[in-house]
């Protein structure tokens, strides 16, 4: 016996603009989150990515193929209502953040990690005064507590 699954019912997927951001409409009807809140995101590019996921649905709607939509839903339905708790939880990862743990080889990976991750660490240092130590391998490195707090 198969479970019930919502099926595609729309023919046109569009991006809509609101004073507070951008949304997605299916045949002119605004997409809502699972908690029935308006699915409104801050940028047109974000809304376009969500619209592309909805437009790609064929037959049964498969939420597992819609990571951008799911991310927006979580931010609106959960994170917005639990912001202090989420900030605390995310900050707990500062001491073991992947940005601080680098590969020793191959050279291409070492260079790629440096090119992609160093700018983020530099931003944290300049913006918050949080200079995090970088190491190679997986052995823990102690980060300055006052920098993690920032």
Image (cartoon, rainbow, N blue to C red):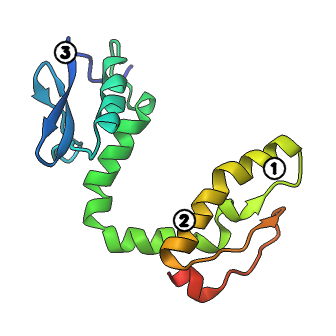
Q: Within 10 Å of the Cα at label 1, are there few (<14), some (14-19), or many (20+) other Cα atoms? A: some
Q: Quadrant of residue 25?
A: top left
Disc nearer the start of the sequence (2/3): 3
Between the C-alphas of marks 2 and 3, the distance is 43 Å
Q: Is residue 111 visible?
A: yes
Q: Quadrant of residue 124?
A: bottom right
Q: Decide: marks 2, 3 in contact (CB < 8 A)?
A: no
Q: Decide: marks 3, 1 in contact (CB < 8 A)?
A: no
Which residue sits at x=34%, y=50%?
74
- Circle 3 sits on which residue? 10
Q: Is residue 3 visible?
A: no
Nearest the viewer among 91 and 6 is 91
- Circle 1 sits on which residue? 110
Q: Secondary structure at mark 1?
A: helix
Q: Within 10 Å of the Cα at label 3, are there few (<14), some (14-19), or many (20+) other Cα atoms? A: few
Q: Position of residue 7 (x, y in %)?
A: 27, 18
Q: Secondary structure at mark 3?
A: loop
Which residue sits at x=54%, y=72%?
126
Q: Is residue 89 left or right of residue 122?
A: left
What is the quadrant of the N terminus in the image?
top left
Which numbered disc, 2 or 3, marks the residue closer to the eye?
Answer: 2
Q: Secondary structure at mark 2?
A: helix
Q: Is residue 20 left or right of residue 64?
A: left
- Circle 2 sits on which residue? 123
Q: Is residue 24 left or right of residue 129?
A: left
In this view, the residue farthest toward the front is: 126
Which residue sits at x=18%, y=33%?
31
Q: Decide: marks 2, 1 in contact (CB < 8 A)?
A: no
Using the image, determine if residue 141 lies above or below residue 3.
Answer: below
Between the C-alphas of marks 2 and 1, the distance is 20 Å
């Amino acid at each position: 016996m198969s479970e019930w699954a919502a099926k595609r019912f729309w023919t046109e997927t569009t991006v809509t603009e609101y004073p507070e951001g951008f949304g997605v409409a299916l045949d002119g009807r605004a997409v809502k989150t699972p908690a029935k809140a308006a699915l409104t995101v801050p940028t047109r590019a974000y809304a376009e990515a969500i619209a592309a996921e909805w437009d790609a649905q064929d037959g049964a709607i498969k939420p597992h193929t819609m990571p951008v939509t799911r991310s927006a839903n979580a931010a609106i339905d959960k994170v917005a209502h639990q912001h202090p708790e989420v900030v605390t939880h995310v900050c707990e990862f500062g001491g073991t953040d992947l940005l601080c743990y680098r590969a020793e080889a191959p050279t291409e990976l070492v260079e790629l990690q440096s090119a992609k991750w160093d700018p983020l660490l530099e931003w944290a240092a300049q913006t918050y005064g949080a200079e995090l130590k970088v190491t190679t391998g997986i052995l823990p490195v102690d980060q300055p507590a006052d920098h993690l707090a920032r």
